[in-house]
Image (cartoon, rainbow, N blue to C red):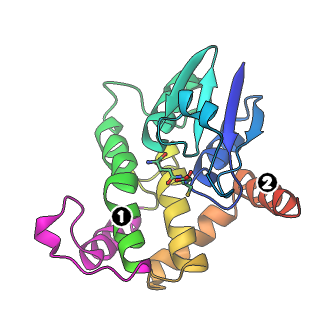
């Protein structure tokens, strides 16, 4: 039994996409994060900061997108979205997956918020470095190399939001080509359709 805690048009989009890629049945619980006091206090037992996403899988709680992505990719190896421990591409996979949250999300968020900072004083560095790194990385086709992995749901979501919704990422040819490849995926198309339905209320 897999329960997914979600809010439309939020960072939990990436896990919705991942679940669609996995094709495993799940029960979606919507969390009202936008009310005056945010999600209900009881939700803190699932996610300590009352944020989405979170999952409960066979009674086990997992929070934080990077952890959820790692957990689900490994829990359902048949989907082939997570290189196994010891596989040659596992290191690139882990690196890309953690990069999405540890670097890409904060450089996009700080830019969107108009915050200025000294890149060498923060763990995530500069937006320019992230853009340059991703341009090189995505020239290989995907976030972790030649094939699609669960890391693409995290990098791809940040890029989709960063390029199309909050417009802080430049429309570099490598980024446009990558997003085109991602948007051709039936699982991402289903995710966007579900989000549209949810947005209607
Ligand atoms: N570190 C968390 C961040 C998730 C996050 O920022 N979620 C936002 C939605 S975009 C949220 O739930 N905000 C509600 C709140 O802070 O009350 C993760 O990566 O899973």
Magenta stretch containing residue 125, yes or no? yes
Which residues lie in the magenta part? 112-140
Residue at 62 percent of width and 24 percent of height: 56
Residue at 45 percent of width and 77 percent of height: 174
Q: Secondary structure at mark 2?
A: helix
Judging by the rendered image, the residue that carries numbered circle 2 is 190
Label 1 near ligand 1 (CB < 8 Å): no
Residue at 60 percent of width and 36 percent of height: 41
Q: Residue furthest left?
A: 120
In the image, is 189 to the left or to the right of 77? right
Label 2 near ligand 1 (CB < 8 Å): no
Crowding at dot 2, Cα within 10 Å, few <14 / some 14-19 / many 20+, comes out as some
In the image, is 96 to the left or to the right of 54? left
The circle on residue 106 is 1
In the image, is 47 to the left or to the right of 200? left
Percent position of residue 156, x then y: 53, 61
């Amino acid at each position: 039994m897999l329960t997914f805690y979600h809010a439309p048009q939020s960072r939990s989009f990436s896990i919705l996409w991942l679940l669609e890629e996995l094709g495993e049945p799940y029960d979606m619980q919507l969390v009202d994060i936008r009310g005056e006091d945010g999600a209900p206090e009881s939700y803190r037992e699932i996610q300590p900061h009352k944020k989405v996403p979170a999952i409960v899988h066979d009674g086990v709680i997992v929070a934080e997108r990077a952890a959820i992505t790692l957990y689900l990719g490994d829990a359902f190896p048949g989907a082939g979205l997570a290189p196994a421990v010891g596989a040659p591409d596992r290191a690139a996979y882990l690196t890309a997956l953690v990069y999405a949250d540890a670097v890409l999300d904060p450089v996009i968020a700080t830019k969107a918020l108009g915050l200025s900072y000294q890149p060498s004083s923060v763990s995530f560095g500069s937006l320019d470095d992230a853009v340059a790194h991703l341009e090189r990385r995505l020239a290989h086709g995907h976030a972790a190399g030649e094939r699609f992995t669960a890391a693409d749901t995290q990098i791809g979501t940040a890029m989709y939001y960063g390029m199309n919704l909050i417009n802080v990422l430049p429309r570099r040819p490598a980024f446009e080509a990558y997003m085109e490849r991602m948007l051709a995926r039936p699982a991402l198309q289903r995710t966007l359709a579900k989000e549209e339905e949810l947005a209607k209320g």
